[in-house]
Amino acid sequence: MTGEFALREHTADVAVEATGPDLGATFAACADGMVAAMCDSVPPDGERFDLAVRAESREALLFDYLDRLLYETDVRGVLPVESEATVRADGDEWVIEASARGVPLDRVRAREVKAVTYSEMVVEETDEGWRAYVVLDV
């Protein structure tokens, strides 16, 4: 199942609010929302790539996951679209195993997202599944 996202205005920044039936779908929807804040349309090319991230809490995992996607944009020169993710607890840590299609940046007109922030970050279980809210520094 997939999650959904909505972009929210946040002073000089932009926020992504995402929901999903599980944490993986919710985190992937956050990633797709971050991409939507960067780019209006995406071409169909690009190769899928995998990544895994570990963190001490769900909030830290969301932060580190989105930060890793920004790293892929900066270092590999790709826009990570069509994210898919699985999140699980592993002892005292949380793990995300994810993939995205990396569209070469020279194929899109993308705005820069400078950073992911902890400002007002929320990761919570709801009656319908999960909800996440993250502010991006643009």
Image (cartoon, grey):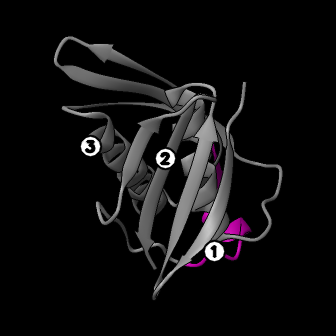
Q: Is mark 3 on a helix, strand or loop?
A: helix
Q: What element carries label 2?
A: strand
Q: Residue furthest bottom?
A: 12
Tell me the crowding category of disc 3: few under 14, some 14 to 19, or many 20 or more residues within 10 angstroms, Cα based. Answer: some
Q: Which residue is drawn at 53% across and 42% down?
A: 131
Picture coordinates of residue 46 (x, y %)?
Answer: 70, 46
Q: In terms of sequence position, does the residue under pointer 2 or pointer 1 come before the other?
A: 1
The quadrant in which residue 93 appears is top left
Q: In terms of sequence position, does the residue under pointer 1 or pointer 3 come before the other?
A: 3
Q: Which residue is more in the foreground, 60 or 47?
A: 60
Picture coordinates of residue 114 (x, y %)?
Answer: 39, 74
Residue 15 forms part of the magenta stretch: no
Residue that badge 3 annotates? 60
* In the depicted structure, whether residue 83 falls above or below residue 121: above
Q: Residue furthest top?
A: 91
Question: Where does the magenta region start and end?
Answer: 101-111
Dividing the image into 4 quarters, which one contains the N terminus?
A: top right
Residue that badge 1 annotates? 110
Side of 103 where 136 appears, left or right: left
Q: Residue at x 63, y 51 (%)?
A: 32
Side of 64 where 132 appears, left or right: right
Q: Residue furthest front?
A: 127
Picture coordinates of residue 33 (x, y %)?
Answer: 62, 57
